Image (cartoon, rainbow, N blue to C red):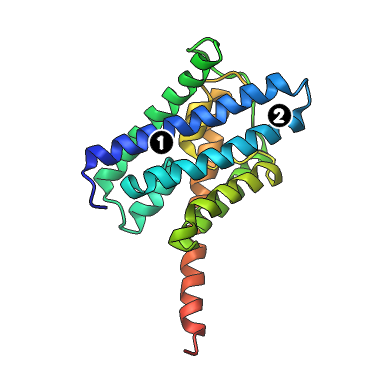
Amino acid sequence: MDSPLTKRLLAEGLGTMLLLAVVIGSGIMGERLAGGNAAVALLANTLATVAGLYVLIEVFGPISGAHFNPAVSLVMAGRRQLGWSDFAHYVLAQLLGAMLGAWLAHAMFELPVLEFSTKVRSGTGQWVAEVVATFGLLLVILRAPQQRVAAMVAAYIGAAYWFTASTSFANPAAAFGRMFSDSFAGISPGSVLGFVVAEFTGAGLAMLAHGVLQARTKGASIA
C-alpha cells in the first residue's frame, strides 16, 4: 500500500462508519416499514448491506484495502501484507468508525444517540454461525480474483445473512458498533465477546484452509 498511514486510517474509519450506518440504518428503516414481518425487514437489511458493502469496497479499497474489519486486518498482518503497528492503528480506526456509524444511524432516524442494545445473541448455534460466516468471508477475500473481490464479498455476506443463524456479523468491529444500537441490527454488550472469539476463530481457520488449498493447487498442477 503506497498511501500514507493517515490517509489509510481515514479510509478505514470512514468506510467502517458508513458500513455500520448502512447496516443499522437499513435495519431501522426495514423494521419500521415491514409491519412486523421480520423476514421483510431482514431482506431490506440484506439488500442495503450488499449494495453498500460493494460500493464501499470499491471506493476505499485502493486506499486502505477496505478491510473495515479487525479479523481481515489480522489475517493481512499475519500474511505480512500489513505491518503489525499499522494493524493496531487499523483496529482502532475501525472500532471508532463502527461506534460513530451507530451514532450516525441513530441521529438520522431521531433515536437516542447514546444507548446500548438489549438484543441477546448467544448460544452454541450463534457462535458456530459466526465461525462459519467469518471463515467464508476470509476465504472469499483470500481466494477471489482481485478484480472481483468487492462483488464476491458483497454477494457472500448477502447469502450469509440468510444461511447463518447469527445473520452473519463476521466482523468484530461490526459487533462492537452494533452494541450501541438497541434496534433490529443490535447486539447486547454481553453477547459481543462470544461473537468476537468466534469471528477470530473463523478467520484463523480460513487462513489454514487457504494455505492447504494453495499448496494442493500447486502440487496438482501438470502445466
Q: Secondary structure at mark 2?
A: helix
Q: Say which residue appears at 50% left-offset and 61% top-offset.
A: 144
What residue would you read off at disc 1?
15
CA–CA distance in space, label 1 to label 2: 24 Å
Q: Position of residue 52 (x, y in %)?
A: 52, 38
11 and 79: which is toward the camera: 11
Q: Position of residue 189 (x, y in %)?
A: 53, 24
Q: Amino acid at mark 2?
A: Ala
Q: Secondary structure at mark 1?
A: helix
What residue would you read off at disc 2?
41
Q: Amino acid at mark 1?
A: Gly
Q: Position of residue 73 (x, y in %)?
A: 38, 47
At label 2, counting other C-alpha atoms closer than 10 Å, the crowd grade (few under 14, some 14-19, many 20 or more) is many
Q: Where, by quadrant of the figure, is residue 44 drawn?
A: top right
Mark on residue 99?
none
Q: Say which residue appears at 30% left-offset and 34% top-offset.
A: 10
Q: Residue 131: in sight, yes or no?
A: no
Which residue is situated farthest in the bottom direction here? 222
Q: Say which residue appears at 70% left-offset and 43% top-offset.
A: 162
Q: Where, by quadrant of the figure, is residue 70 drawn?
A: top left
N-terminal-most mark, 1 or 2: 1
Is residue 214 left or right of 46 when viewed as pictured? left
Q: Position of residue 46 (x, y in %)?
A: 64, 38
User: How many dots with numbers?
Assistant: 2
